[in-house]
Image: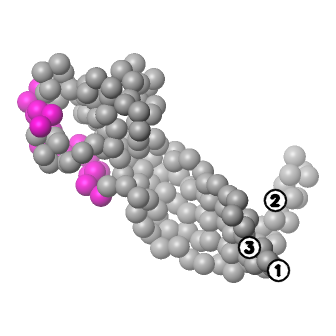
Amino acid sequence: MRACQTALAILMATLLLTACPVPIPPHSLGTRENVADMVPAFIQERKTTREDVFMRLGEPDAVAIDDSWVVYGYGKSQGGVAFVMAAGSGAGGVLVEGAYYRRLIIRFDPNGVVAFATLETKACPHYAGGVNSQGGESYPCLDIWGKDIPAKFNWPEKRPD
C-alpha cells in the first residue's frame, strides 16, 4: 500500500512539474439539454400519453424492446483541468473533471399511458487519459443510456443501439 501511495505521489509531482495544465470549462457531455432537474409537470401518471411525451421531449435516448419504457439522459461537465505533456515524438495527457448526470425514466402501460416516471441524478469525477493515439476514459457513474434499467427494475430489455 505504501509503495502505491509513493508511486501516486511521484506521478502527481511529475504532472505538476512537467505538464502544461489546461483549464477545462463546463460543457455538455454530448447529450440532450432538455432533461430538467425534476420530472416535468406535464408528465402525469395515468394521464399523459406516449405521444405527449415524445412531442414535448423528442426521441428518447433508450427504448425498451417492447416500447414499455424510455429513458432521456443528460450529462454535463462541471469543468476541470487537463495536463498535457510532450517529449520527442510522443505526447500524452490526463483530464480530470467533475461530471453531473441525470436521467428521466418513463414506464408506459399497455395502452401507452404513463404508469411511472422518475428522475435519477448523480455527480462524480470523470477521467480520461492517453499516450500518443492510445487512451481511454472512465464510464459515467449513471448510465444515461439505460442499459442497466432491465436489471434494476426487472423490466424488458433495451433495444440494441
* Number of residues whose C-alpha sits closer than 10 Å to that of mark 3, classed few (under 14), some (14–19) or many (20 or more): few
Main SS of the magenta segment?
Answer: loop
Q: Where is residue 6 in the image (x, y as percent from the top left)?
A: 88, 58
Cβ–Cβ under 8 Å for marks 3 and 2: no
Which sits in the foreground, 130 or 18?
130
Q: In this picture, is 56 found above or below 22?
A: above
> Which three-letter amino acid code belongs to the residue tagged 3?
Ala
Instruction: Mark 2 or mark 1: name the one nearer the start of the chain.
Output: 2
Q: Name the residue under label 2.
A: 8
* Number of residues whose C-alpha sits closer than 10 Å to that of mark 2, classed few (under 14), some (14–19) or many (20 or more): few
Whether 36 is among the magenta residues is: yes
Q: Name the residue under label 3.
A: 91
Q: Can the viewer see residue 9?
A: yes
Residue, far right: 3
Separation (CA) of disc 3 from disc 1: 8 Å
What segment is highlighted magenta in the picture?
A: 33-51
Cβ–Cβ under 8 Å for marks 2 and 1: no
Q: Position of residue 26 (x, y in %)?
A: 44, 69
Image quarter for residue 40?
top left
At a point 79% along the width and 77% down the height, the residue shown is 89
At a point 32% along the width and 28% down the height, the residue shown is 64
- Looking at the rendered structure, which numbered label has been put on residue 88? 1
Instruction: Mark 3 or mark 2: name the one nearer the start of the chain.
Output: 2
> Which three-letter amino acid code belongs to the residue tagged 1?
Gly
Which sits in the foreground, 111 or 127?
111
Mark 3 or 2, closer to the camera: 3
Separation (CA) of disc 2 from disc 1: 24 Å
